[in-house]
Amino acid sequence: MPKVRVPRKNVTPGEIVTVLSRRLGAGYQVESDGGRRVTVRKSALRYANISISDQPGASVFGVHGGGFIVLRLPRGRRPAPLPRVPQPLNLPSAVSAARPPAL
């Protein structure tokens, strides 16, 4: 689980909710569960849980992503179509006979 260490003790879930709500904007829902956890939601299928723990002189946030992950592969550029090679003409036999033989 990724961890973020903040050099300040006793960071409250309310402070995290306030800061993340302001920085992430209206597209995200940030709420506290009343304990030492904060949940950030982008949609019902995409979210992150943040747990808060204290260490000497710092607060540590453990971040755990969750939800339904949709893997979107980038669509590459399609290759340019190959140039069309003209097909040899079906010449009448009289014209073919006048042509010198190929070596």
Image (cartoon, helix red, strand yellow):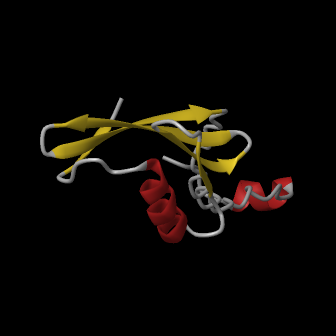
Using the image, determine if residue 21 lies above or below residue 57. below
Q: Looking at the image, which is closer to me, 91 or 95?
A: 91
Identify the residue at horizontal 33%, vertical 51% (top origin).
11
In terms of image quadrants, where is residue 19?
A: bottom left
Identify the residue at horizontal 45%, vertical 37% (top origin).
36
Query: Please, which residue is most extreme toward the right here?
Result: 92
Using the image, determine if residue 72 lies above or below residue 20. above
Is the N terminus in the top left, top right, bottom left or bottom right quadrant? top left
Q: Where is residue 68 in the image (x, y as percent from the top left)?
A: 67, 33
Q: Is residue 22 left or right of residue 70?
A: left
In terms of image quadrants, where is residue 15?
A: bottom left
Q: Where is residue 62 in the image (x, y as percent from the top left)?
A: 36, 36
Using the image, determine if residue 3 lies above or below residue 28. above
Identify the residue at horizontal 71%, vertical 39% (top origin).
45
Counting labels gives: 0
Q: Looking at the image, which is closer to me, 63 or 99?
A: 63
Identify the residue at horizontal 60%, vertical 42% (top origin).
47
In terms of image quadrants, where is residue 29?
A: bottom right
Query: Please, which residue is most extreme toward the left here?
Result: 56
Q: Looking at the image, which is closer to me, 84 or 97?
A: 84
Q: Position of residue 37 (x, y in %)?
A: 49, 38
Q: Is residue 24 left or right of residue 91?
A: left
Q: Position of residue 60 (x, y in %)?
A: 27, 40
